[in-house]
Image (cartoon, rainbow, N blue to C red):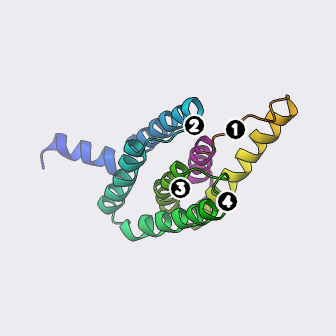
Amino acid sequence: MSHDTNVAWTLLTDGDVPVVLLSMWCVWLSWIDVVSRRLPNMLTGIGAVCILAYSYVIDAFVVALSGAVLLFFCYLAVHLCLPTAFGAGDVKLAFTLGGVAALAGTDAWVAAALIAPLLTGVVGVACMAVGRASATVPHGPSMCAATLLASAAVPT
């Protein structure tokens, strides 16, 4: 590899670039979810491919895949039992975010999985408090925020 390629490779595997890209993706998805109450398949699919590819490059594929599959099935179980609790987009988003959180460690994964529904609940209660009880609260933004916060804050 040339020197320029080495620098780019280091930024992608050890630098802040993955965190910035993940954050931008989360903001984009959250905005779409707030505005349209939808999480587009194209974006959730790209996220899944990217986290698996990234985890392969950093030699943590099994960790990311395990976290992704586990959170996906947790969300799928809730969605199948109570479809109004989470949308199908949230189930698909759980795959990517489960992989991200798993890369930050077991404690981060658990924190992200528990904090996301709590955040959505807090927003729902706030809506009720201001007289917007009939407002639907998108869950995607809480999922993204919980994962980013837990991944950054929970020591590995």
Tell me the residue that label 3 is attached to.
91
Which residues fall within the magenta stretch? 140-156
Where residue 135 sits: x, y (%)?
Answer: 73, 34
Q: Is residue 111 above or below residue 26?
A: below
Q: Horizontally, is 27 left or right of 86 in the view?
A: left
Residue 116 spot, x, y in % from top left: 66, 51
Circles 1 and 2: CB atoms closer than 8 Å: yes
- Amino acid type for the residue under numbered disc 4: Leu
Find disc 4 in the rendering and name its residue.
82
Q: Earlier in the sequence, mark 1 or mark 2?
A: 2
Residue 37 — which label? 2
Q: Is residue 138 magenta?
A: no
User: Are circles 2 and 4 on residues that touch, CB within 8 Å?
Assistant: no
Task: Tell me how far mark 1 sits from mark 4, CA to CA.
Answer: 15 Å
The quadrant in which residue 65 appears is bottom left
* Residue plotted at (54% across, 67% down): 73
Real-space CA distance between mark 1 and mark 2, rounded to the nearest whole angstrom: 9 Å
The residue lying at 53 percent from left, 58 percent from top is: 101
| Disc 3/disc 1 C-alpha distance (Å) | 17 Å
Whichever of callouts 3 and 1 sits on the residue coming sooner in the sequence is: 3
The residue beneath circle 1 is 136
Q: Amino acid at mark 2?
A: Arg
Of the 4 image quadrants, the one containing the C terminus is bottom right
Q: Nearer the viewer, mark 3 or mark 4?
A: 4
Instruction: Give the dominant element type of the magenta stretch: helix, strand or loop.
Output: helix
Front residue of 17/84: it is 84
Q: Are marks 3 and 2 in contact (CB under 8 Å)?
A: no
> Does residue 39 appear left or right of residue 49 in this picture?
right
Note whether 138 is above or below 56 in the view shown. Answer: above
Calculate the distance from the C-alpha at mark 3 to the C-alpha at mark 4. 12 Å
